[in-house]
Image: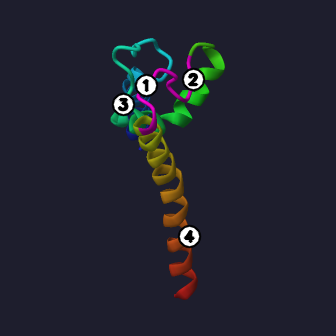
């Protein structure tokens, strides 16, 4: 059981490093190549991790400043709402099912 926890922890840490490879504010986007819709979705999904990294590194932000405008915003908010809002709806549904039984 302890071996599984160690392997799971290592996989979780490696996944976190892979997921943060394209974080907002890392200067990978320029005015000629701004962040678009899919970047907005990605940045919305990794927003909690980016927030923690941003505490320790001043140039990292949750939101990419160099973006394509409305489409980036749309993707970002869809990811935020579906990620966090979807979890709370799932939890409520599960809680109601337990109370009905």
Residue that mark 3 sits on: 36
Q: Nearer the viewer, residue 44 or 36?
A: 36
Q: Secondary structure at mark 1?
A: helix
Residue at 39%, 29% in the rendered image: 19
Which numbered circle lies on residue 67?
none
Residue that mark 4 sits on: 92
Report the mark closest to the observer, 3 or 1. 3
Q: Secondary structure at mark 2?
A: loop
Report the mark closest to the observer, 2 or 3. 3
Residue that mark 2 sits on: 61
Which residues are the magenta region? 60-70
Q: Is residue 85 magenta?
A: no
Report the mark closest to the observer, 2 or 4. 2
- 58 vs 64: above or below: above
Which circle's residue, 2 or 1, is located before the other in the chain? 1
Which circle's residue, 4 or 3, is located before the other in the chain? 3
Which circle's residue, 3 or 1, is located before the other in the chain? 1
Q: With 29 as the anchor, is 24 left or right in this view?
A: right
Tag 3 near tag 1, CB within 8 Å: no
Q: Crowdedness of circle 3 by 10 Å Cα count: few (<14), some, many (20+)?
A: many
- Image mark count: 4
């Amino acid at each position: 059981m302890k071996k599984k926890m160690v392997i799971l922890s290592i996989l979780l840490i490696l996944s976190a490093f892979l997921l943060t490879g394209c974080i907002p504010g890392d200067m990978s986007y320029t005015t000629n190549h701004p962040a678009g819709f899919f970047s907005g979705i990605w940045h919305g999904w990794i927003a909690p991790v980016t927030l923690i990294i941003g505490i320790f590194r001043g140039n990292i932000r949750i939101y990419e400043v160099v973006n394509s405008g409305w489409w980036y915003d749309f993707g970002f908010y869809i990811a935020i709402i579906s990620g966090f809002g979807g979890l709370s709806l799932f939890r409520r549904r599960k809680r109601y099912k337990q109370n009905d039984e």
